[in-house]
Image (spheres, rainbow, N blue to C red):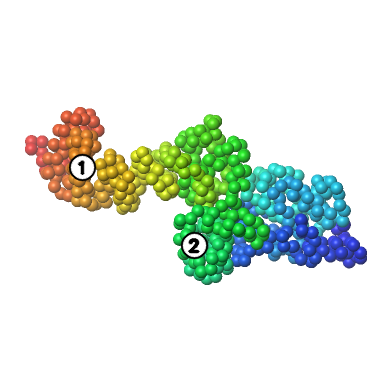
Amino acid sequence: MSDNQLTGGVSGAAAQIGAVYGAVTVGGGRSGRLPYRAGSVPPVVRGFQPRAVAELESLVSGGVVLSGLGGVGKTQTAAEYVRRKAGEVQLMGWITASTRSNVVSGLAELHAVVTETVIDDAELAAHRFLDWCTSTTHPWLLVFDDVEDPAELAGLWPDTGTTGRFVVTTRRNEPWALEADGRGLTPLGVFTEQESAAYLRGVLGDVEGIEELAALLGHLPLALGQAAAFMLMRPGMSCSDYIRKWQNRSLKDMFPGDWVGVDGRRDTVATTWSISIEAADLLQPAGLARPLLTVMSLLDPNGIPLSVLTSEPVLKYLSDGSGESVDEDAATQALGNLRRLSLISIEGEPVARVHALVQQATRALLPQDRLPLLSRMIADALMECWPDVERDAEHAAALRNNTTALVEHAKQQLWVPGCHDVLLRVGRSLGATGQIHTAISYHKSLLATGELLLGLDHPTTFTIRNNLAEWQGTAGNWAEASRAYAELLADQVRTIGPDHPATLTTRMNLAEWQGRTGDAATTTQSVAELLEDLLRVLGPDHPVTLRARNRLAYWREEAGLDDAD
Protein backbone atom coordinates (compact mmCIF):
# COMPACT_ATOMS: atom_id res chain seq x y z
CA MET A 1 0.00 0.00 0.00
CA SER A 2 1.41 3.40 -0.89
CA ASP A 3 1.14 6.37 1.45
CA ASN A 4 -1.61 7.97 -0.64
CA GLN A 5 -3.78 4.91 -0.07
CA LEU A 6 -3.71 5.37 3.70
CA THR A 7 -6.48 7.95 3.51
CA GLY A 8 -8.95 5.41 2.11
CA GLY A 9 -11.53 6.57 -0.40
CA VAL A 10 -10.80 3.80 -2.93
CA SER A 11 -12.68 0.66 -3.66
CA GLY A 12 -11.96 -3.02 -3.36
CA ALA A 13 -9.31 -4.67 -1.20
CA ALA A 14 -7.27 -1.50 -0.93
CA ALA A 15 -10.20 0.30 0.67
CA GLN A 16 -10.71 -2.49 3.20
CA ILE A 17 -7.08 -2.52 4.24
CA GLY A 18 -6.99 1.26 4.38
CA ALA A 19 -9.99 1.26 6.70
CA VAL A 20 -8.28 -0.92 9.26
CA TYR A 21 -4.84 0.62 8.91
CA GLY A 22 -5.09 2.68 12.05
CA ALA A 23 -5.85 -0.46 14.06
CA VAL A 24 -2.87 -2.60 13.08
CA THR A 25 -1.44 -4.77 15.85
CA VAL A 26 1.59 -7.03 15.74
CA GLY A 27 1.06 -10.70 16.46
CA GLY A 28 -2.69 -10.27 16.76
CA GLY A 29 -3.85 -9.53 13.24
CA ARG A 30 -6.27 -6.73 12.41
CA SER A 31 -8.99 -5.74 14.79
CA GLY A 32 -11.51 -3.55 13.00
CA ARG A 33 -11.39 0.08 14.04
CA LEU A 34 -10.19 -0.63 17.57
CA PRO A 35 -6.85 1.05 18.38
CA TYR A 36 -5.51 -2.26 19.62
CA ARG A 37 -6.69 -5.75 20.44
CA ALA A 38 -6.54 -7.43 23.85
CA GLY A 39 -3.68 -9.89 23.97
CA SER A 40 -1.53 -7.67 21.79
CA VAL A 41 -1.32 -4.44 23.75
CA PRO A 42 -1.78 -5.39 27.41
CA PRO A 43 -4.93 -4.07 29.09
CA VAL A 44 -4.39 -1.53 31.83
CA VAL A 45 -4.96 -2.81 35.35
CA ARG A 46 -7.68 -1.50 37.62
CA GLY A 47 -6.36 1.26 39.83
CA PHE A 48 -3.56 2.12 37.37
CA GLN A 49 -1.59 5.15 38.48
CA PRO A 50 -0.51 7.54 35.72
CA ARG A 51 3.23 7.88 36.09
CA ALA A 52 4.85 11.28 35.93
CA VAL A 53 6.93 10.58 32.83
CA ALA A 54 7.43 13.98 31.25
CA GLU A 55 9.33 12.52 28.31
CA LEU A 56 6.30 10.50 27.21
CA GLU A 57 3.86 13.34 27.64
CA SER A 58 5.95 15.67 25.50
CA LEU A 59 6.61 13.05 22.80
CA VAL A 60 5.45 14.25 19.37
CA SER A 61 8.11 12.43 17.41
CA GLY A 62 11.15 10.55 18.56
CA GLY A 63 11.66 7.82 21.13
CA VAL A 64 11.59 7.14 24.87
CA VAL A 65 13.22 4.17 26.59
CA LEU A 66 11.52 3.27 29.88
CA SER A 67 14.14 1.50 31.99
CA GLY A 68 13.75 0.03 35.44
CA LEU A 69 13.63 -2.90 37.81
CA GLY A 70 11.33 -5.77 36.93
CA GLY A 71 7.94 -5.09 38.50
CA VAL A 72 7.97 -1.28 38.49
CA GLY A 73 5.28 -1.08 35.80
CA LYS A 74 7.16 -0.24 32.61
CA THR A 75 4.84 -2.29 30.36
CA GLN A 76 1.72 -0.91 32.03
CA THR A 77 3.00 2.64 31.61
CA ALA A 78 3.63 2.04 27.91
CA ALA A 79 0.24 0.34 27.45
CA GLU A 80 -1.60 3.20 29.12
CA TYR A 81 0.28 5.67 26.91
CA VAL A 82 -0.73 3.71 23.80
CA ARG A 83 -4.37 3.65 24.95
CA ARG A 84 -4.41 7.43 25.27
CA LYS A 85 -2.50 8.19 22.07
CA ALA A 86 -3.89 5.56 19.69
CA GLY A 87 -6.37 8.05 18.24
CA GLU A 88 -3.57 10.40 17.24
CA VAL A 89 -1.74 7.92 14.98
CA GLN A 90 -2.61 5.97 11.87
CA LEU A 91 -0.42 2.99 12.65
CA MET A 92 0.21 1.43 16.03
CA GLY A 93 2.42 -1.60 16.52
CA TRP A 94 3.22 -3.46 19.74
CA ILE A 95 6.04 -6.01 19.65
CA THR A 96 7.24 -8.22 22.50
CA ALA A 97 10.92 -7.58 21.87
CA SER A 98 12.58 -10.16 24.14
CA THR A 99 14.26 -11.83 21.13
CA ARG A 100 15.51 -10.69 17.76
CA SER A 101 13.26 -13.15 15.94
CA ASN A 102 10.17 -11.64 17.61
CA VAL A 103 11.16 -8.18 16.46
CA VAL A 104 11.97 -9.29 12.93
CA SER A 105 8.67 -11.11 12.50
CA GLY A 106 6.74 -8.20 14.02
CA LEU A 107 8.33 -5.63 11.73
CA ALA A 108 7.83 -7.93 8.75
CA GLU A 109 4.11 -8.19 9.52
CA LEU A 110 3.86 -4.43 9.72
CA HIS A 111 5.58 -4.22 6.35
CA ALA A 112 2.97 -6.54 4.88
CA VAL A 113 0.20 -4.27 6.19
CA VAL A 114 1.58 -1.00 4.84
CA THR A 115 2.55 -2.45 1.41
CA GLU A 116 -0.01 -5.26 0.88
CA THR A 117 3.03 -7.32 -0.02
CA VAL A 118 4.32 -10.44 1.70
CA ILE A 119 8.05 -11.08 1.38
CA ASP A 120 9.39 -14.53 2.25
CA ASP A 121 12.59 -12.99 3.62
CA ALA A 122 11.50 -11.65 7.03
CA GLU A 123 14.75 -9.73 7.60
CA LEU A 124 14.35 -7.96 4.27
CA ALA A 125 10.72 -7.15 5.01
CA ALA A 126 11.63 -5.82 8.44
CA HIS A 127 14.26 -3.47 7.02
CA ARG A 128 11.88 -2.23 4.33
CA PHE A 129 9.36 -1.39 7.02
CA LEU A 130 12.06 0.53 8.88
CA ASP A 131 12.74 2.46 5.66
CA TRP A 132 9.03 3.27 5.52
CA CYS A 133 9.13 4.56 9.11
CA THR A 134 11.83 7.03 8.19
CA SER A 135 10.15 8.41 5.06
CA THR A 136 6.41 8.32 5.73
CA THR A 137 4.43 11.46 6.49
CA HIS A 138 1.76 9.57 8.41
CA PRO A 139 1.88 9.46 12.22
CA TRP A 140 2.74 6.10 13.73
CA LEU A 141 3.49 4.64 17.15
CA LEU A 142 5.63 1.57 17.76
CA VAL A 143 6.41 -0.17 21.07
CA PHE A 144 9.26 -2.59 21.71
CA ASP A 145 8.24 -4.20 24.98
CA ASP A 146 10.67 -6.04 27.29
CA VAL A 147 13.95 -5.68 25.38
CA GLU A 148 16.32 -8.13 27.08
CA ASP A 149 19.53 -7.48 25.16
CA PRO A 150 19.83 -4.22 23.18
CA ALA A 151 22.81 -5.55 21.25
CA GLU A 152 20.72 -8.41 19.86
CA LEU A 153 18.50 -5.87 18.09
CA ALA A 154 21.33 -4.20 16.18
CA GLY A 155 20.00 -2.80 12.90
CA LEU A 156 16.35 -3.08 13.98
CA TRP A 157 15.90 0.21 15.84
CA PRO A 158 13.52 2.47 13.88
CA ASP A 159 14.35 6.02 12.91
CA THR A 160 11.22 7.96 13.87
CA GLY A 161 11.67 10.57 11.16
CA THR A 162 9.28 13.48 11.62
CA THR A 163 6.06 11.61 12.36
CA GLY A 164 6.96 8.52 14.37
CA ARG A 165 6.84 7.81 18.09
CA PHE A 166 8.85 4.92 19.51
CA VAL A 167 8.58 3.55 23.07
CA VAL A 168 10.87 0.88 24.53
CA THR A 169 10.55 -0.95 27.84
CA THR A 170 13.56 -2.76 29.25
CA ARG A 171 15.33 -3.72 32.45
CA ARG A 172 18.61 -2.66 30.88
CA ASN A 173 19.85 0.87 31.34
CA GLU A 174 23.08 1.28 29.35
CA PRO A 175 22.84 4.71 27.71
CA TRP A 176 25.38 3.78 25.03
CA ALA A 177 23.20 0.87 23.89
CA LEU A 178 19.74 2.40 24.23
CA GLU A 179 20.04 6.11 23.52
CA ALA A 180 20.36 7.70 20.10
CA ASP A 181 19.52 10.98 18.43
CA GLY A 182 15.90 11.60 19.25
CA ARG A 183 15.67 8.67 21.69
CA GLY A 184 16.43 9.19 25.39
CA LEU A 185 16.68 6.91 28.40
CA THR A 186 14.09 7.51 31.12
CA PRO A 187 14.31 5.62 34.43
CA LEU A 188 11.05 4.42 35.95
CA GLY A 189 11.05 3.75 39.66
CA VAL A 190 8.62 2.43 42.23
CA PHE A 191 5.40 4.21 43.13
CA THR A 192 5.45 7.24 45.34
CA GLU A 193 3.67 6.88 48.68
CA GLN A 194 0.67 8.70 47.21
CA GLU A 195 0.56 6.49 44.10
CA SER A 196 0.80 3.32 46.19
CA ALA A 197 -2.07 4.41 48.42
CA ALA A 198 -4.22 5.44 45.47
CA TYR A 199 -3.57 2.14 43.68
CA LEU A 200 -4.42 -0.02 46.70
CA ARG A 201 -7.57 1.98 47.43
CA GLY A 202 -8.60 1.56 43.81
CA VAL A 203 -8.38 -2.22 44.22
CA LEU A 204 -9.20 -2.85 47.88
CA GLY A 205 -11.35 0.14 48.68
CA ASP A 206 -10.81 2.70 51.41
CA VAL A 207 -9.61 0.28 54.09
CA GLU A 208 -7.27 0.78 57.02
CA GLY A 209 -3.58 -0.05 56.85
CA ILE A 210 -3.02 0.92 53.21
CA GLU A 211 0.04 3.04 53.95
CA GLU A 212 1.64 0.39 56.16
CA LEU A 213 1.10 -2.31 53.54
CA ALA A 214 2.60 -0.13 50.80
CA ALA A 215 5.66 0.61 52.92
CA LEU A 216 6.10 -3.10 53.72
CA LEU A 217 6.23 -3.90 50.00
CA GLY A 218 8.55 -1.02 49.14
CA HIS A 219 5.96 0.63 46.86
CA LEU A 220 6.74 -1.90 44.09
CA PRO A 221 3.72 -1.97 41.73
CA LEU A 222 3.96 -5.70 40.97
CA ALA A 223 4.16 -6.56 44.67
CA LEU A 224 1.22 -4.31 45.50
CA GLY A 225 -0.85 -5.92 42.76
CA GLN A 226 -0.08 -9.44 43.87
CA ALA A 227 -0.61 -8.68 47.56
CA ALA A 228 -3.99 -7.14 46.75
CA ALA A 229 -4.90 -10.25 44.72
CA PHE A 230 -3.86 -12.45 47.65
CA MET A 231 -6.12 -10.49 49.98
CA LEU A 232 -9.08 -10.50 47.58
CA MET A 233 -8.82 -14.29 47.37
CA ARG A 234 -9.33 -14.39 51.14
CA PRO A 235 -12.49 -12.46 52.00
CA GLY A 236 -12.23 -10.60 55.25
CA MET A 237 -8.42 -10.37 55.24
CA SER A 238 -7.35 -6.88 56.26
CA CYS A 239 -4.10 -5.09 55.56
CA SER A 240 -3.03 -5.65 59.16
CA ASP A 241 -3.81 -9.38 58.79
CA TYR A 242 -1.60 -9.54 55.72
CA ILE A 243 1.23 -7.66 57.44
CA ARG A 244 1.10 -9.99 60.45
CA LYS A 245 1.28 -13.06 58.23
CA TRP A 246 4.18 -11.51 56.30
CA GLN A 247 6.37 -11.56 59.40
CA ASN A 248 6.35 -15.37 59.59
CA ARG A 249 5.95 -16.47 55.98
CA SER A 250 8.31 -16.69 53.02
CA LEU A 251 8.12 -14.26 50.13
CA LYS A 252 6.55 -16.77 47.75
CA ASP A 253 3.90 -17.73 50.31
CA MET A 254 2.50 -14.20 50.51
CA PHE A 255 1.61 -13.86 46.83
CA PRO A 256 -0.88 -15.94 44.81
CA GLY A 257 0.69 -19.16 43.59
CA ASP A 258 -1.58 -19.18 40.52
CA TRP A 259 -1.05 -15.51 39.74
CA VAL A 260 -1.93 -14.41 36.21
CA GLY A 261 -1.97 -10.69 35.58
CA VAL A 262 -4.48 -8.95 33.32
CA ASP A 263 -1.78 -8.94 30.66
CA GLY A 264 -1.52 -12.73 30.84
CA ARG A 265 1.88 -12.73 32.50
CA ARG A 266 2.63 -15.14 35.32
CA ASP A 267 5.68 -13.37 36.73
CA THR A 268 5.60 -13.25 40.52
CA VAL A 269 7.62 -11.13 42.88
CA ALA A 270 9.57 -14.22 43.90
CA THR A 271 10.61 -14.99 40.32
CA THR A 272 10.46 -11.73 38.37
CA TRP A 273 14.15 -10.91 38.80
CA SER A 274 15.60 -14.34 38.07
CA ILE A 275 16.11 -13.56 34.39
CA SER A 276 17.81 -10.26 35.21
CA ILE A 277 20.12 -11.85 37.77
CA GLU A 278 21.07 -14.62 35.37
CA ALA A 279 21.73 -12.10 32.60
CA ALA A 280 23.88 -9.93 34.87
CA ASP A 281 25.83 -12.98 36.03
CA LEU A 282 26.65 -13.92 32.43
CA LEU A 283 28.17 -10.54 31.63
CA GLN A 284 31.94 -10.26 31.97
CA PRO A 285 33.43 -10.81 34.45
CA ALA A 286 31.05 -13.76 34.54
CA GLY A 287 29.88 -15.29 37.79
CA LEU A 288 30.39 -12.25 40.05
CA ALA A 289 27.07 -10.40 39.87
CA ARG A 290 25.04 -13.01 41.72
CA PRO A 291 27.39 -13.40 44.72
CA LEU A 292 27.71 -9.61 44.98
CA LEU A 293 23.93 -9.32 45.06
CA THR A 294 23.91 -11.94 47.81
CA VAL A 295 26.31 -9.78 49.83
CA MET A 296 24.05 -6.78 49.26
CA SER A 297 20.99 -8.74 50.35
CA LEU A 298 22.25 -8.66 53.95
CA LEU A 299 22.90 -4.92 54.02
CA ASP A 300 20.91 -1.67 54.04
CA PRO A 301 18.79 -1.30 50.88
CA ASN A 302 18.87 2.49 51.16
CA GLY A 303 22.61 2.85 50.65
CA ILE A 304 25.57 0.47 50.75
CA PRO A 305 28.99 2.18 50.51
CA LEU A 306 30.76 1.06 47.36
CA SER A 307 33.98 0.87 49.38
CA VAL A 308 32.42 -1.99 51.38
CA LEU A 309 31.49 -3.90 48.23
CA THR A 310 35.02 -3.62 46.84
CA SER A 311 36.88 -4.18 50.12
CA GLU A 312 39.46 -6.91 50.61
CA PRO A 313 37.14 -9.27 52.53
CA VAL A 314 34.56 -9.10 49.73
CA LEU A 315 37.22 -9.52 47.03
CA LYS A 316 38.51 -12.63 48.83
CA TYR A 317 34.95 -13.98 49.08
CA LEU A 318 34.44 -13.45 45.34
CA SER A 319 37.84 -14.99 44.56
CA ASP A 320 37.16 -18.07 46.67
CA GLY A 321 33.77 -18.54 45.01
CA SER A 322 34.99 -18.11 41.44
CA GLY A 323 38.31 -19.90 41.80
CA GLU A 324 40.05 -16.91 40.23
CA SER A 325 41.66 -13.80 41.65
CA VAL A 326 39.11 -10.96 41.74
CA ASP A 327 40.41 -7.40 42.08
CA GLU A 328 38.64 -4.12 42.74
CA ASP A 329 38.18 -3.41 39.03
CA ALA A 330 36.42 -6.74 38.48
CA ALA A 331 34.12 -6.19 41.47
CA THR A 332 33.30 -2.68 40.24
CA GLN A 333 32.49 -4.07 36.80
CA ALA A 334 30.21 -6.70 38.37
CA LEU A 335 28.38 -3.94 40.22
CA GLY A 336 28.02 -2.19 36.87
CA ASN A 337 26.44 -5.34 35.46
CA LEU A 338 23.86 -5.37 38.24
CA ARG A 339 23.17 -1.73 37.47
CA ARG A 340 22.87 -2.46 33.74
CA LEU A 341 20.03 -4.86 34.54
CA SER A 342 18.40 -2.33 36.90
CA LEU A 343 18.87 -4.64 39.88
CA ILE A 344 20.71 -1.90 41.76
CA SER A 345 21.05 1.83 41.35
CA ILE A 346 24.11 4.03 41.71
CA GLU A 347 23.07 7.64 41.25
CA GLY A 348 26.21 9.75 41.37
CA GLU A 349 26.89 8.85 45.01
CA PRO A 350 29.47 6.50 46.53
CA VAL A 351 26.66 4.12 47.52
CA ALA A 352 24.56 1.44 45.84
CA ARG A 353 20.84 0.98 46.46
CA VAL A 354 18.76 -2.15 45.99
CA HIS A 355 15.04 -2.78 46.47
CA ALA A 356 14.21 -4.58 49.70
CA LEU A 357 12.16 -7.23 47.86
CA VAL A 358 15.08 -7.99 45.54
CA GLN A 359 17.11 -8.51 48.70
CA GLN A 360 14.44 -10.73 50.18
CA ALA A 361 14.17 -12.87 47.06
CA THR A 362 17.96 -13.19 46.98
CA ARG A 363 18.19 -14.15 50.66
CA ALA A 364 15.58 -16.85 50.09
CA LEU A 365 18.08 -18.64 47.83
CA LEU A 366 20.94 -18.40 50.34
CA PRO A 367 21.73 -21.78 51.95
CA GLN A 368 21.55 -21.34 55.72
CA ASP A 369 24.88 -23.10 56.24
CA ARG A 370 26.58 -20.25 54.34
CA LEU A 371 25.09 -17.51 56.50
CA PRO A 372 27.65 -17.65 59.36
CA LEU A 373 30.69 -17.28 57.10
CA LEU A 374 29.03 -14.70 54.87
CA SER A 375 27.82 -12.60 57.81
CA ARG A 376 31.22 -12.38 59.47
CA MET A 377 32.89 -11.65 56.13
CA ILE A 378 30.56 -8.70 55.59
CA ALA A 379 31.23 -7.54 59.15
CA ASP A 380 34.96 -7.66 58.37
CA ALA A 381 34.31 -5.56 55.27
CA LEU A 382 32.43 -2.95 57.29
CA MET A 383 35.25 -2.77 59.81
CA GLU A 384 37.86 -2.36 57.08
CA CYS A 385 36.00 0.66 55.73
CA TRP A 386 35.37 2.26 59.12
CA PRO A 387 37.84 5.12 59.72
CA ASP A 388 39.35 5.65 63.14
CA VAL A 389 38.31 9.30 62.98
CA GLU A 390 34.85 9.84 61.48
CA ARG A 391 35.15 13.05 59.49
CA ASP A 392 32.36 12.14 57.04
CA ALA A 393 29.09 12.01 58.99
CA GLU A 394 27.09 10.52 56.11
CA HIS A 395 29.62 7.74 55.59
CA ALA A 396 29.62 6.92 59.30
CA ALA A 397 25.82 6.85 59.36
CA ALA A 398 25.78 4.53 56.34
CA LEU A 399 28.19 2.14 58.05
CA ARG A 400 26.01 2.10 61.18
CA ASN A 401 22.84 1.53 59.15
CA ASN A 402 24.45 -1.30 57.23
CA THR A 403 25.66 -2.93 60.42
CA THR A 404 22.13 -2.71 61.83
CA ALA A 405 20.75 -4.39 58.71
CA LEU A 406 23.42 -7.09 58.88
CA VAL A 407 22.59 -7.80 62.52
CA GLU A 408 18.91 -8.13 61.66
CA HIS A 409 19.60 -10.79 59.03
CA ALA A 410 22.55 -12.52 60.67
CA LYS A 411 20.86 -12.77 64.08
CA GLN A 412 23.36 -14.46 66.42
CA GLN A 413 26.00 -15.18 63.76
CA LEU A 414 28.03 -12.13 64.77
CA TRP A 415 28.33 -13.51 68.30
CA VAL A 416 29.90 -16.82 67.26
CA PRO A 417 32.56 -17.62 68.36
CA GLY A 418 32.60 -14.19 70.03
CA CYS A 419 31.23 -10.69 69.61
CA HIS A 420 32.43 -9.23 66.31
CA ASP A 421 34.28 -5.92 66.64
CA VAL A 422 31.79 -4.19 64.34
CA LEU A 423 29.11 -4.41 67.04
CA LEU A 424 31.33 -2.50 69.45
CA ARG A 425 32.30 -0.07 66.70
CA VAL A 426 28.69 1.01 66.19
CA GLY A 427 28.41 2.03 69.83
CA ARG A 428 31.63 4.01 69.71
CA SER A 429 30.48 5.72 66.52
CA LEU A 430 27.16 6.75 68.04
CA GLY A 431 28.88 8.32 71.02
CA ALA A 432 31.59 9.97 68.94
CA THR A 433 28.99 11.68 66.76
CA GLY A 434 27.22 13.18 69.76
CA GLN A 435 24.36 10.68 69.98
CA ILE A 436 25.16 9.95 73.62
CA HIS A 437 21.75 8.77 74.79
CA THR A 438 21.38 6.59 71.71
CA ALA A 439 24.81 5.14 72.47
CA ILE A 440 23.68 4.34 76.02
CA SER A 441 20.52 2.59 74.79
CA TYR A 442 22.54 0.69 72.20
CA HIS A 443 25.05 -0.55 74.80
CA LYS A 444 22.29 -1.63 77.16
CA SER A 445 20.79 -3.75 74.41
CA LEU A 446 24.22 -5.06 73.41
CA LEU A 447 24.95 -5.93 77.04
CA ALA A 448 21.73 -7.91 77.37
CA THR A 449 22.67 -9.97 74.31
CA GLY A 450 26.26 -10.39 75.50
CA GLU A 451 25.21 -11.63 78.92
CA LEU A 452 22.78 -14.08 77.32
CA LEU A 453 25.15 -15.48 74.68
CA LEU A 454 28.59 -15.06 76.28
CA GLY A 455 27.88 -14.98 79.97
CA LEU A 456 28.31 -12.43 82.75
CA ASP A 457 32.05 -12.95 83.16
CA HIS A 458 33.13 -13.02 79.52
CA PRO A 459 35.85 -10.45 78.62
CA THR A 460 33.65 -8.98 75.88
CA THR A 461 30.80 -8.57 78.35
CA PHE A 462 33.22 -6.66 80.59
CA THR A 463 34.18 -4.47 77.62
CA ILE A 464 30.54 -3.65 76.89
CA ARG A 465 29.95 -2.80 80.57
CA ASN A 466 32.99 -0.51 80.50
CA ASN A 467 31.75 1.28 77.38
CA LEU A 468 28.24 1.65 78.78
CA ALA A 469 29.58 3.19 81.99
CA GLU A 470 31.79 5.56 79.96
CA TRP A 471 28.85 6.93 77.97
CA GLN A 472 26.70 7.19 81.09
CA GLY A 473 29.39 9.38 82.63
CA THR A 474 29.76 11.41 79.43
CA ALA A 475 26.01 12.04 79.53
CA GLY A 476 26.47 13.62 82.99
CA ASN A 477 25.32 10.62 85.02
CA TRP A 478 28.53 10.62 87.10
CA ALA A 479 27.14 8.75 90.09
CA GLU A 480 25.59 6.09 87.83
CA ALA A 481 28.89 5.70 85.98
CA SER A 482 30.76 5.38 89.30
CA ARG A 483 28.42 2.63 90.49
CA ALA A 484 28.74 0.79 87.19
CA TYR A 485 32.55 0.91 87.32
CA ALA A 486 32.58 -0.21 90.97
CA GLU A 487 30.45 -3.25 90.13
CA LEU A 488 32.60 -4.02 87.08
CA LEU A 489 35.78 -3.74 89.17
CA ALA A 490 34.49 -6.20 91.74
CA ASP A 491 33.66 -8.75 89.02
CA GLN A 492 37.05 -8.29 87.34
CA VAL A 493 38.99 -8.73 90.58
CA ARG A 494 37.02 -11.89 91.20
CA THR A 495 37.52 -13.41 87.73
CA ILE A 496 40.74 -12.09 86.20
CA GLY A 497 42.55 -10.77 89.27
CA PRO A 498 43.58 -7.37 90.61
CA ASP A 499 46.71 -7.04 88.44
CA HIS A 500 45.09 -7.68 85.07
CA PRO A 501 45.49 -4.65 82.74
CA ALA A 502 41.71 -4.47 82.26
CA THR A 503 41.21 -4.39 86.04
CA LEU A 504 43.78 -1.62 86.43
CA THR A 505 42.11 0.39 83.66
CA THR A 506 38.75 0.05 85.39
CA ARG A 507 40.30 1.39 88.61
CA MET A 508 41.51 4.43 86.67
CA ASN A 509 38.05 5.00 85.17
CA LEU A 510 36.32 4.55 88.52
CA ALA A 511 38.58 7.10 90.15
CA GLU A 512 37.87 9.60 87.37
CA TRP A 513 34.09 9.45 87.67
CA GLN A 514 34.20 9.43 91.47
CA GLY A 515 36.23 12.61 91.24
CA ARG A 516 33.55 14.21 89.08
CA THR A 517 31.07 13.73 91.92
CA GLY A 518 33.09 16.19 94.01
CA ASP A 519 35.37 14.09 96.23
CA ALA A 520 38.74 15.19 94.84
CA ALA A 521 40.68 14.13 97.92
CA THR A 522 39.45 10.52 97.80
CA THR A 523 40.09 10.41 94.07
CA THR A 524 43.65 11.69 94.60
CA GLN A 525 44.31 8.91 97.09
CA SER A 526 42.80 6.27 94.74
CA VAL A 527 44.90 7.41 91.78
CA ALA A 528 48.07 7.50 93.91
CA GLU A 529 47.50 3.90 95.04
CA LEU A 530 46.71 2.88 91.47
CA LEU A 531 49.93 4.49 90.22
CA GLU A 532 51.99 2.35 92.59
CA ASP A 533 50.38 -0.82 91.20
CA LEU A 534 50.78 0.38 87.61
CA LEU A 535 54.48 1.00 88.12
CA ARG A 536 54.82 -2.49 89.57
CA VAL A 537 52.72 -4.33 86.93
CA LEU A 538 53.02 -2.33 83.72
CA GLY A 539 56.15 -0.27 84.25
CA PRO A 540 56.81 3.49 84.12
CA ASP A 541 56.42 3.91 80.35
CA HIS A 542 53.08 2.16 79.78
CA PRO A 543 50.34 4.50 78.41
CA VAL A 544 48.03 3.74 81.36
CA THR A 545 50.85 4.54 83.80
CA LEU A 546 51.59 7.81 82.05
CA ARG A 547 47.90 8.69 82.08
CA ALA A 548 47.72 7.96 85.80
CA ARG A 549 50.67 10.31 86.45
CA ASN A 550 48.91 13.05 84.54
CA ARG A 551 45.59 12.51 86.31
CA LEU A 552 47.24 12.37 89.72
CA ALA A 553 48.70 15.82 89.13
CA TYR A 554 45.29 17.07 88.02
CA TRP A 555 43.41 15.69 91.04
CA ARG A 556 46.05 16.91 93.51
CA GLU A 557 45.49 20.39 92.15
CA GLU A 558 41.71 19.94 92.35
CA ALA A 559 42.06 18.80 95.98
CA GLY A 560 44.24 21.80 96.82
CA LEU A 561 47.30 19.70 97.63
CA ASP A 562 50.85 20.78 96.88
CA ASP A 563 53.92 18.64 96.42
CA ALA A 564 54.70 18.70 100.14
CA ASP A 565 51.40 17.04 101.07
Can you tell which quarter of the image residue 137 is in? Answer: bottom right
Q: Residue at x 32, y 50 (%)?
A: 445
Give percent across and percent down for residue 563.
10, 36
Q: Quadrant of the N terminus?
A: bottom right
Q: Residue at x 16, y 36 (%)?
A: 530
Relative to residue 453, is residue 45 drawn left or right? right
Residue closest to the far right: 11
Amino acid at pointer 2: Tyr
Identify residue for label 1.
491
Sequence order check, earlier mark of 1 and 2: 2
Where disc 2 sits, the SS reads: helix
Disc 1 crowd, CA 10 A, few/some/many (<14, 14-19, 20+)? some
Q: Residue at x 10, y 41 (%)?
A: 561
Q: Quadrant of the C terminus?
A: top left
Pointer 1 and pointer 2: residues touching (CB < 8 Å)? no
Relative to residue 20, is residue 481 drawn left or right? left
Front residue of this view, candidates 236 and 146: 236
Spatial CA distance of label 1 from label 2 is 49 Å
Image: 341 above or below 253: above
Give percent across and percent down for residue 33.
79, 66
Identify residue for label 2.
242
Q: Is residue 187 at all visible to an observer of this figure?
A: no
Front residue of this view, candidates 265 and 325: 265
Can you tell which quarter of the image residue 269 is in? Answer: bottom right
Image: 498 above or below 28: above
Give percent across and percent down for residue 96.
71, 53
